[in-house]
Image (cartoon, rainbow, N blue to C red):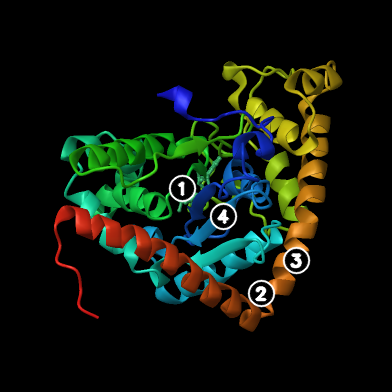
Amino acid sequence: MSEIIKENTEIKCSDLVGEKSNTEKKIIFSGAQPSGKMTLGNYLGAIKNWTMFQDDYECYYSVVDLHAITVPQDPATLRRQTFELLAQYIACGIDPEKCTLFIQSHVIEHLELMWVLNTMTYMGELNRMTQFKDKAKKSELNLNAGLFTYPVLMAADILLYQADLVPVGEDQRQHIELTRDLANRFNNRFSDTFKIPEGFMPKEAARVMSLQDPSKKMSKSDSDPNAFILLADDSDAIARKIKRSVTDSVGVVRYSDEQAGIKNLIDIYANLSGKSVEEIVSMYEGKGYGVFKQETAEIVVETLRPIREKYLYLLENKDYLKEIYASGAVKAQAKARKTLRKVYKKIGFVARER
Ligand code: AQP
């Protein structure tokens, strides 16, 4: 399956677009959950890549609040985090003039298509999803059906927009594969309806790991705040978290699975500096972890500083954010309804009288 995933960050948008000038623009869909503040993992694995498509693609980027409630959320916090995430998208460089930015629950078609796809998804397929297994472990007392069918909602998100490409982190690979399977299943059972999307994953930092336990990914909902770096963290917090990050007793900066903490920091450094892993390893030959950590922190701080400043400014401008998501929902809904009308017709639903 791996050949379907375009994993090369070197790839140029113009290569992907192909004959754009003579045909319609290709389509991108992606989203993130307002389940916390955005982490460096979300940024490097996903959002940073979203910006590179916005000139050449028709981009739909959503704050996926329907996904967020698959684990319990405090209502006031969820509302606040939805605004914060939207502000962070824009602060990260996503241009609302070029992209359609919207809140998932404002486009009801996501749930309608999800239901149809639910009826075509096998329990065995969902049982195999590692994200479900991981999250189920964390919330054994509240194993709800939404957590189980989360990947079907994600498939609906993508297929509604007839997306060609879905820029996501490595952790979403399995969900993209399921989306392709469902699209093919529907197309084969009825007739060609959905475009078959491809995942787009960056080579470095496709999976940024926890700073406290480098065997698991960095997650915004981690109960230990030292495990993640937030885009909203100030310089001191970033430096402190990187300084405290878990490493090993080897004491040599090397890119090796046996030194997972250092490997993770090298990946972050490489992604943000544009330097290769080999260059970084040779730069720190004979130097200890202290200096490596300090310089990694400096790069992270300098990258995140302008994002944080813009984010704080946008948060003060709620009316502006409201305008963005209101017009985004209108555009997204027009596109989504078109696909859903086709789907309803093909499965045999009687068309609505208007
Ligand atoms: N650690 C990560 N490394 C690389 N990419 C990551 N992504 C998330 N974590 C990493 C990518 O970020 C995008 C948005 O993710 P999401 O908010 O939809 O949900 P998630 O993958 O479940 O992210 P979190 O931070 O782990 O959220 P919680 O803690 O709520 O579950 C996706 O493209 C994802 O691949």
Spot occupied by residue 118 in the image (x, y as percentages of width and height): 21, 50
Give the spatial CA distance, label 3 vs label 1: 29 Å
- Mark 2: which amino acid? Leu
Query: Which label sits on residue 310?
Result: 3
- Kind of element beneath mark 2: helix
Vertical placement of residue 296 versus 341, above or below: above
In the rendered structure, which disc, 2 or 4, sits on the residue that comes first in sequence?
4
For label 2, the residue is 315
For label 4, the residue is 59
In the rendered structure, which disc, 4 or 3, sits on the residue that comes first in sequence?
4
Give the spatial CA distance, label 4 vs label 3: 22 Å
Residue 129 appears anywhere in the view: yes
Number of the front mark, 3 or 1: 1
- Mark 3: which amino acid? Lys
For label 1, the residue is 163
- Mark 1: which amino acid? Ala
In the rendered structure, which disc, 2 or 1, sits on the residue that comes first in sequence?
1
